[in-house]
Image: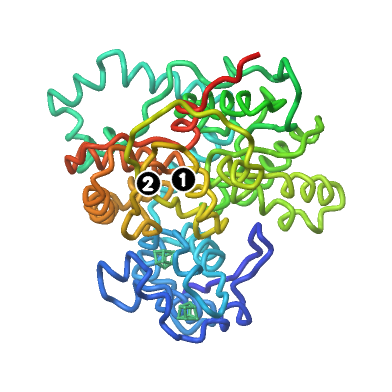
């Protein structure tokens, strides 16, 4: 029997008996779980997975193929945590279980090597990520992608590869660190001292959202520190069980953002914001980093959280537009940011917000889930797109890059006529520059 050895996670919580026994089997989480909804199998529910983890951790069950499949079938959307009356930290359990699965024989050596390469070598190094993204840009824009798709050659390399290739975010022509100034000082009065996280994938694939966020902060009268040498926050690595790299990157980011004085560290990516808010907890016992980590975490604000709390004076252009809002899981379930984006959007005159049915139900993007569990992800996306279609809104607003691309792809695939934008993009279009 292959033994499950609970190991220390980055968040310092072990899936030991105390944690695993928090679940009171009430089943309140079942109705919120997209994978249980699809299969109606107990083992695909949060409650069922907790039972599986417990059985393997206690040595009562093998770390079997089914166990491995169920841990990877979970979206880690954490909707079950929001629903749980007992405060079960399900996300920590499943992430720890995935570390064990990755170390087991149920993952092929090729899959392990690809994952390690993608996380450590590409995303783990800003320089390598930029080189890889530049190559991808040429592939996407210089005809090679078109040739592979029109000739059908891409299908030789694997089932669903053409679809997954179409789903991949487009690489930005210019990366945001090439045009955003490291220091921006307003010409008139400084209303807020801010810093801006430009991220890893955001920097190379959503540079336009970083530009919109920066311009919006300028319009508000913010001083903005955007360090050129900032690195990935480490969230992708932590959620995939590579705590060592996550730890290293987080420390680098803390160093970079500790060089200057500011009051708010603005994030426009739900997953990154959620993870940076955890730094205080992650490094609480680190004599060198505890204080800096606590300081950084206390300043992290999602852009919509910042706008909602500070309510800066903004002058809007007149608009007449319908829109709906999709809650990114890492905003709604992890950071509990639900009302703030709606408050901010409801302030815009002429913007008619139409409520989205099941707005907190995952869109199926979930990090790399839409690649690894592609068919399931598309079923979940179909449901999201039906709900969006029913609103009749011309614009879908959502605060996470993965959700933006997934819903954009869903609009093409399921023929829903709607533009998908980040709140910062929409607001930057509508908010006027102040007269100087
Ligand atoms: S994280 Fe999401 S998919 Fe996983 S068990 Fe919880 S609700 Fe279900
Ligand atoms: S809601 Fe919480 S306590 Fe109830 S079954 Fe789900 S995880 Fe367990």
Q: Name the residue beneath numbered marker 2.
A: 353
Q: Is residue 192 above or below residue 26?
A: above
Residue 29 percent across, percent down from the top left: 42, 75
Give the quarter the ligand 1 occupies.
bottom left
Q: Residues within 10 Å of mark 1 (few under 14, many from 20)?
A: few
Looking at this view, name the residue that lies furthest to the right.
287
Disc sitting over residue 346 in the figure: 1
In contact (CB < 8 Å): disc 2 and disc 1: yes
Q: Nearer the viewer, residue 141 or 66?
A: 141
Give the image quarter of residue 307. top right
Residue 345 percent across, percent down from the top left: 47, 43
Rendered residue at 48%/16% (across/down): 174
Q: Report whether 171 appears left or right of 87.
A: left
Q: Nearer the viewer, residue 179 or 431?
A: 431
Q: Report whether 131 appears left or right of 162.
A: right
Upstream in sequence: badge 2 or badge 1: 1
Q: CA distance from mark 2 to mark 1?
A: 7 Å
Give the image quarter of residue 337. bottom right
Q: Residues within 10 Å of mark 2 (few under 14, many from 20)?
A: many
Residue 159 percent across, percent down from the top left: 20, 43
Report helix, strand or loop for mark 1: helix
Q: Is residue 34 above or below residue 353?
A: below
Q: Nearer the viewer, residue 409 or 286?
A: 409
Quadrant occupied by the C terminus: top right
Disc sitting over residue 88 in the figure: none
Q: Report whether 230 appears left or right of 291.
A: left
Rendered residue at 31%/58% (across/down): 357
Rendered residue at 34%/71% (across/down): 44
Q: Does mark 2 have its CB less than 8 Å from ligand 1?
A: no
């Amino acid at each position: 029997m292959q033994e499950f050895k609970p190991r220390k996670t980055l968040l310092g919580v072990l899936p030991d008996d105390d944690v695993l026994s928090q679940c009171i089997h009430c089943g309140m989480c079942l109705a919120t779980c997209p994978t249980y909804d699809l299969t109606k199998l107990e083992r695909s529910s949060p409650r069922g997975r907790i039972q599986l983890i417990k059985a393997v951790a206690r040595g009562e069950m093998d770390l079997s193929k089914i166990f491995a499949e169920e841990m990877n079938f979970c979206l880690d959307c954490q909707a079950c945590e929001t629903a749980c009356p007992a405060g079960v930290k399900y996300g920590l359990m499943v992430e720890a279980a995935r570390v064990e699965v990755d170390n087991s024989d149920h993952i092929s050596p090729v899959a392990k090597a690809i994952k390690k390469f993608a996380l450590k070598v590409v995303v783990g190094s800003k320089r390598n990520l930029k080189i890889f993204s530049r190559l991808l840009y040429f592939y996407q824009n210089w005809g090679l992608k078109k040739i592979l798709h029109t000739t059908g050659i891409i299908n030789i390399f694997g089932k669903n590869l053409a679809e997954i290739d179409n789903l991949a975010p487009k690489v930005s022509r210019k990366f945001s660190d090439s045009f955003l100034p490291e220091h921006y000082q307003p010409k008139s009065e400084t209303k807020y001292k801010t810093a801006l996280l430009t991220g890893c994938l955001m920097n190379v694939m959503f540079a336009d959202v970083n530009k919109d966020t920066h311009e919006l902060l300028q319009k508000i009268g913010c001083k903005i520190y955007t360090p050129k040498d900032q690195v990935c926050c480490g969230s992708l690595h932590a959620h995939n069980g590579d705590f060592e790299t996550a730890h290293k990157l987080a420390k680098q980011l803390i160093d970079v953002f500790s060089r200057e004085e500011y009051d708010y560290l603005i994030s426009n990516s739900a997953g990154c914001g959620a993870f940076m808010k955890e730094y205080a907890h992650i490094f609480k016992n680190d004599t060198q980093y505890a204080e800096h980590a606590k300081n950084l975490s206390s300043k992290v604000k999602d852009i919509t959280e910042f706008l909602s709390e500070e309510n800066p004076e903004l002058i809007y252009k007149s608009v007449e537009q319908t829109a709906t809002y999709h809650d990114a899981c890492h905003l709604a379930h992890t950071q509990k940011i639900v009302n703030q984006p709606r408050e901010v959007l409801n302030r815009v005159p002429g913007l008619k917000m139409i409520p989205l049915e099941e707005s907190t139900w995952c869109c199926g993007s979930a990090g790399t889930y839409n690649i690894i569990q592609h068919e399931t992800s598309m079923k979940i996306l179909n449901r999201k797109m039906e709900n969006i279609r029913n609103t009749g809104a011309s614009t879908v607003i959502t605060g996470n890059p993965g959700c933006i691309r997934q819903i954009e792809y869903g609009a093409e695939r399921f023929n829903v006529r709607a533009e998908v934008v980040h709140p910062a993009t929409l607001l930057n279009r509508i908010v006027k520059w102040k007269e100087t």
